[in-house]
Image (cartoon, rainbow, N blue to C red):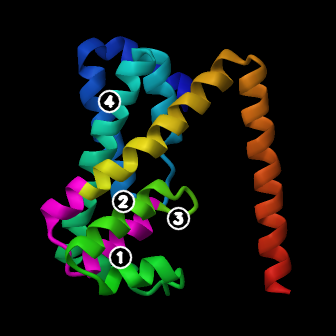
Amino acid sequence: MESYLLDLFKVLGDFAIALSIILNIFISVLGVVPSVVITAVNIKFFGFENGLFISIIGEALGSIVSFYLYRKGINKLLNSKEITNKYVTKLMKSRGIEAFCMIIFLRVFPFIPSGIVTLAAAISKVGIINYSVASTIGKIPSLVIEAYSIQQVLIWNWKGKGILCLFLLFSIWFIYSKSRGKK
């Protein structure tokens, strides 16, 4: 997928920015697909700073479009999933500055899927402007960390190897702890 997107970006030239943003919006609307591949392609194709900036724009716009669509009716289709995270549940019941701060917190916190945060915010009383600003502010630190990690893995120096090892160890621990919790 990554090499296909890189080739497509090369063919599109300046229009690759628009495609990247559109793909980020599409992934955000789906709510369950990670955007790490697009971020990686952006870093490879546009360079670190430009790729990060394009990823931030794409994810921010994707989040706003998702919020709007969820609020207008898609949330009825997704409402069948029970949300058990106490912070997400609290966001659903909050408003004003409390909701604003919770959105920032949940966006920075890497273990809560973006689609769940967007869905909870869409169900809550938060307005689209407050949501948009808070969501974008919260996405910036996590995207910087994601982009830096991707860059180090692509360079494949000791930092990249360390990041990949830590990610694998965390994944193994997470899967193991989830499987023990179900027994």
Residue 87 percent location from the top left of the image: 47, 77
In the rendered view, tell whether residue 93 sits above or below residue 29.
below
Q: Which of marks 1 and 4 is nearer the N terminus?
A: 4
Q: Are marks 1 and 3 in contact (CB under 8 Å)?
A: no
In whole angstroms, how far apart are the C-alphas of marks 1 and 3?
11 Å
Q: Name the residue under label 1.
A: 120
Q: Which of marks 2 and 4 is nearer the N terminus?
A: 4
Specify whether 52 is left or right of 128.
right
Specify whether 167 is left or right of 65.
right
In whole angstroms, how far apart are the C-alphas of marks 2 and 1?
13 Å
Q: Mark 4 points at which residue?
A: 54
Q: Mark 2 points at which residue?
A: 104
Q: Tell us which disc is closer to us: 2 or 3.
A: 2
Residue 10 percent location from the top left of the image: 39, 12
Q: Earlier in the sequence, mark 1 or mark 3?
A: 3
Q: Find numbered disc 1 in the image and state the secondary structure of the residue it sits on.
A: helix
